[in-house]
Structure formats: C-alpha cells, structure tokens
Image: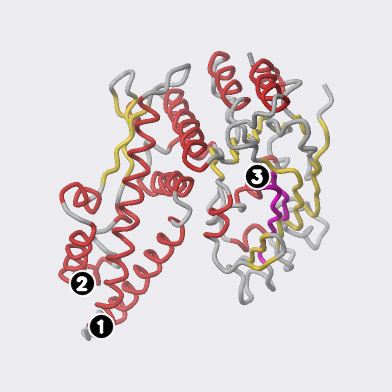
Amino acid sequence: MLIAARQDRRSASTAGLAPPGGQLGVTRLVLTQFRNYRSVRLDLDPHPTLGPVVLTGPNGAGKTNLLEAMSFLSPGRGLRNARLSDIDRRDEAPNGGPQGGDEPSGSGWAVATTLATRRGPISIGTGRIGPGRNGTGGERRTIRIDGEPVREQAALGERFGVLWLTPQMDRLFVEGPSGRRRLLDRLVLGLDPAHAARVARYEQALRERSRLLRDGFPSGRSADPVWLAAIEDIIAAEGVAVAAARRDAIEQLDRVCATTEGAFPRARLKLLGTVEDWLDTMTALAAEDRLRAALARNRAGDAVSGGAGIGPHRSDLAVVHADKGIAAEAASTGEQKALLIAIVLAQARLQRAVRGEAPLLLLDEVAAHLDATRRAALFEVLAGLDSQAWMTGTDAALFAPLRGIARFLNVCDGAVSPTIF
C-alpha cells in the first residue's frame, strides 16, 4: 500500500500532472553549536521524491535536537518552547568532564536550511548570535530568508507551515490549558500566517498593561489612565482578532476531523472562551468595545492578580473522541495519542487544501505507543501527503514498512550517518 501510494505520485509526475501543491521538504540542514551538535550537515537528494525521514538511535543521542532545529523554521520558540540561550551547545567541563556541563559555548547557535517548496527552493538561516546567557541580546534570534535579513518572525509562517508532535504533548488533554493554547495557535498559524504577529502584539500589550498596573499599585498611585486606555485599545483590537482567527481555524479543522475515516479516531474540536462566545452573537467591533470596557472595569483586580482576568489568553481547546462520545481527557492514554495524531493529520490535509501545500511534519517518538494497525495507517497517510515527515525512534524495526520509501539515518553522540540494516 505504501509503495503503491508513492508510485501513484511518481506516475502523476511523469504524466505531466503535478502532485497536489507540489512537495515541501528539507534538502539541506546545517547545525552549528546547537544543543549537542558542534557542527553537522545533512544533504538530502530531492529526486525523485522528498520522502519521509526516519531518525533512529539511543536515547540522548540528539534525535529530538534535530527536530527542534527544524521547528525554528517557524515563528516562536521551537518545539521545546525553550529560552534561546539555553539551546547553546555546552562546552566540555573544565575538569575534563562530559559534554553538557554548565558552561555555554558563548557564540550562540545557528540553523541553516534549504527547502523545496511549491514556489521553488528557499534558503533560511536563523539563530542566536550573542555573547552568552549573561550578556545582552541573548534572547533575540536573527532570521535570513534567501540571504536577506528579516525583522519579523511572521515572515517564516508566510512561506510554509511546520507542525510537530512530541512525547511531552501526550498529556496535553489532562494538564492545564497553556499547552493546548500553544497547539491551538500552531494550528491557526498553518492556515493564517499573520496569526503569530497578532498573538505577539497582544501578549506584549498585556505585559505592558500588567507592568503599569503593578508599578502603580504598591504606592497607591493610579497608572496614567490615558496610557492605560491606549494599551487597552491594542489589547481589545488584537485580542478580538486572535479570537476570531482561532474560531475560524478550529471550525474548519473540526469539519475535516468530523469526516475523517480510518484507523485513527474521529476528533471533534470546540474553542472555549469568553471573547470567542461574544463573536457568536455580535460583530468584531462590538466585541472590541466590550473587551475594552471589561479591561477598564477590572483594573484594580488585575493590579492585585498581576494579569488580566478576561481575554483570549485564557481560552481553551476542548476535544471529544467522537466515536466513543467522551471527552479526550477521559480517554485512555493510547486513545489520547491517537486523537492528537488524527488532529495533526487532519490539519495537514486542511493546510494543503487551503494553502496548496501541507506542512513539514516533525513527529518525535510517534510510533512507539501505536499498535501495528495504526502505525501502518500513519505511514500510509504520510507517504501520500506530498510533504516531508521527520520521525524519530529508538527501534528502527518499528518503521520497517517504510524501508525503500523513507530515508533512514542513525544518530549517535551528535553524529548522523545512514542507517545500515
């Protein structure tokens, strides 16, 4: 089945029919001073196709670090949500101890890639260039696209999408809402590249309002009402835009999930939030007015709590296992993993339909807890997506159905080489 899917794509190409949206994938990846990699370069021949890539090796070898490096091809702080300075490769301890001591290299880190996209190849370089964790500029990253400096990270999302699953996300449905909001915004970004910039402006305005309220509270002084009103204007406008984008994206994704058939469960998605509920019954401008008034009314309480009691930063994503009629958090651990995979695969299909190109998929330890039927179903979908999927695992045997289709690479102690079977 997998080989047939790949052959169908090659036959379409030779017949002069381009596959849907073309192929997206990494053809070159260079890491410098990144986590446990001093320097590594991977060159992947894009011909005849950009198939899946399977990274295998022992725990701690650096497989996830490679996926994290590629996650910086999108806006944000990568799949670990890490401080940029924490990514610096650690120099060997002064007493000759093992790599990974407390001392960062001090030179920052860099990721350079070339990708095949439906619009042609694109080169991206990004990294942290600074004097180290205690110096200035340590939490700023630079970005270049085709050699030109880019000021806004949102420019990355405009070129293509990146989506990932990690083992840390396995508890997404049973832990607090912050992780679900991160996934939510990643899903929205795949359909609406401007979303990252809106979220950044909204969060920056929230922080500025909290600082003004906090500084005025201990002394009994009120913050400048004109300044506060100006900031709350930004929060209201950007907050409603964020909520509307989330609402639209989740409605689209829910429709795709509802009609999905196969080995993975059908997921139904619903956005939970006060501002999102307002948008069901009023215009965006009316919702902005209502949010602005609520922020002004709640200043005293927000000064004490140190945040804002209302806004899309408190929204949540509810997921239901539709085939069983139960909330995701009540499902078994294996079913929760399957629901997450189903959502990611549905998002990939939706993004291909909306943007003409499915996202680059980074799937960390995705096969370890799937039974043989679901592993086969996952590999079948990935083989037909026309975008590259990178997968990691300690056991190459789990990926045996992909032999002859995927590139297998072995990762060991910060070095990458072809897997020998």
Q: Position of residue 218 (x, y in %)?
A: 26, 81
Q: Which residue is mark 2?
A: 299
Q: Position of residue 81 (x, y in %)?
A: 53, 53
For the residues labelled 3 and 1, the Cα–Cα distance comes to: 50 Å
Q: Is residue 124 left or right of residue 184?
A: right
Magenta residues span 112-128
For the residues labelled 2 and 3, the Cα–Cα distance comes to: 48 Å
Mark before the other along the chain sequence, 3 or 1: 3
Q: Which amino acid type is shown beneath numbered disc 3?
A: Thr
Q: Secondary structure at mark 3?
A: loop
Question: Could you tell me which residue is drawn at 31 percent across and 52 percent down?
Answer: 244
Q: Is residue 127 magenta?
A: yes
Q: Which amino acid type is shown beneath numbered disc 1?
A: Ala
Q: Is residue 79 left or right of residue 96?
A: left
Categorize mark 1 by other alpha carbons within 10 Å: few (<14), some (14-19), many (20+).
some
Q: Position of residue 388 (x, y in %)?
A: 65, 36
Q: Splitting the image into 4 quarters, where does residue 106 fall?
A: bottom right
Q: Which residue is mark 1?
A: 223
Magenta residues, dominant SS class: strand
| Disc 2 and disc 1 in contact, CB within 8 angstroms | yes
Q: Nearer the viewer, residue 188 or 394?
A: 188
| Disc 2 and disc 3 in contact, CB within 8 angstroms | no
Which quadrant is home to the N terminus?
top right
Q: Nearer the viewer, residue 69 or 43?
A: 43
Q: Which residue is mark 3?
A: 117
Categorize mark 2 by other alpha carbons within 10 Å: few (<14), some (14-19), many (20+).
many
In this rendering, the answer to whether 184 lies above or below 53 is: below
Q: Nearer the viewer, residue 89 or 372?
A: 372
